[in-house]
Amino acid sequence: MWFIGVDGGGSKCRALISDEKGRTLGVGLGGPANPLHGYEQAVASVMSAIRDALHDAGLERRALTESIACLGLAGVNLPSLRQRMLAWQHPFAGLHLVTDLHIACRAAHDGGDGAVIISGTGSCGVAVVGDTETIFGAHGFPMGDKGSGAWLGLEALRYYLLADDGFVERGALYKAFQQHFQTDDALAIIEVMAGKGSSAYAALAKLVFNSAEQHDEHAIAMLKDGANYLDQLADKLLRCGPPRLTMVGGLTECWQPWLRADIAAQLEPALIAPEAAAAKLAHAQAHKRSA
C-alpha cells in the first residue's frame, strides 16, 4: 500500500508518495489546483503532480490502485466544489479530501495544535486548538483573499490604470508594469489580463514589493494595507489560544518585514511540508478504514 499526499493551491500543487513506514519515495509538481478557477484544470494538475511523483519513486501507474490519496485543495471549503471533487472517478483505492488550509495547519505544527496564516496566491487564517478549528477568510479571489498575491496583483493593476489616465502619479510601479508586459498600451494589458484567474494576478505581486524597495509611495501604501490586514488576522488567531503561530505561502518572506514587530517575533517555522502532512493523513485514514 502506498500513500499519496497532495497540496494544491491557486498557482501550483505538490505531490508526495510514501510507504507504510512513512518514508518518502517520490515527489512531483503540477499546475494550479483550485477547482473554483477550473475543475478540469485542478484534476489535471493533481494527476500531473502525482505522475511526476510516481516517476520519481520508480513506480508504475498501476500503483495508484493500491494507494490511498489525501488531497488538500484550495476551494473545496465551498460545498458544491467539494461534492464535485468527491464525485471524481479517481484511480485510487481510496480518497480523502480536505482543504489546503487544513493541510497547511497540520504541516505547520506536525498534527498538533497551532495557528497558521497563509499568504500565497490566496490568503486565510486557521487555528486548531483541541477539537475546535477556527477559520478566517478563505473567501476566494476576487471577493476576498486580502493580503494575498492575487489581491496585491489586482490592486497594482487598478493603480496602473488610474496612473495611465493621469489620476495618480506614475512612479516605479507604473514603469514596472510596462516592463513586465512589454508595452505602454493600457488596453493591451487589459486584453492580456481579461478573464485570467488568481495565479495570473499573483504573478504581479512581486512588482509591488520590488517597486516599494524603490520608494514608490503607491506600492508602499498597498503593502501597508495588506500587512495591516495580516496583522489583524494574526491578532484574531492568537485570541484563539494556539501554542504556536506560523506563516506559510509563497509571499511569507516578502511580507514578514512589513508585519508588526510583535507579530513577526511570534512566527515559528512550519515543522513539515504540506504534502508530507497530507501523506501522513492518508496513512491515518487507511488505518481507520482497516480498523
Image (cartoon, helix red, strand yellow):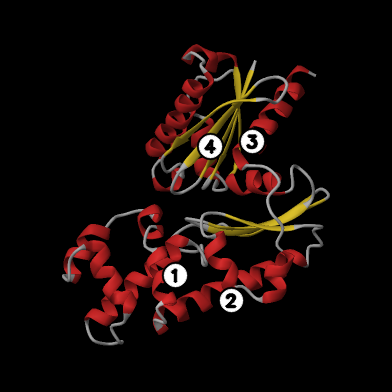
On the rendered image, what quadrant is the C terminus found in? top right
**Can you give x and y, in whole percent of width and height, for residue 255 in the image?**
55, 67
Q: Which residue is mark 1?
A: 209
Vertical arrangement, residue 290 with respect to residue 36, above or below: above
| Residue type, mark 3 in image | Ala
41 lies left or right of 251: left
Q: Which residue is mark 3?
A: 276
Distance from label 3 to label 4 (Cα)? 24 Å
Residue occupying the point 49% across, 40% down: 13
Vertical arrangement, residue 109 with respect to residue 30, above or below: below
Closer to us: 137 or 24: 24
In front: label 1 or label 4: 1
Element at label 2: helix
Element at label 3: helix
| Residue type, mark 1 in image | Phe
Find residue 170 and report its image quarter.
Answer: bottom left
- How packed mark 4 is, by other alpha carbons closer than 10 Å (few <14, some 14-19, many 20 or more), is few
Looking at the image, tell me whether mark 2 or mark 1 is earlier in sequence order.
1
Q: Which residue is mark 4?
A: 83
Q: Is residue 127 visible?
A: no
Vertical arrangement, residue 122 with respect to residue 176, above or below: above
In front: label 2 or label 3: 3
Residue occupying the point 63% across, 47% down: 104
Looking at the image, tell me whether mark 1 or mark 4 is earlier in sequence order.
4
Distance from label 4 to label 2 (Cα)? 35 Å
Element at label 1: helix
In front: label 3 or label 1: 1
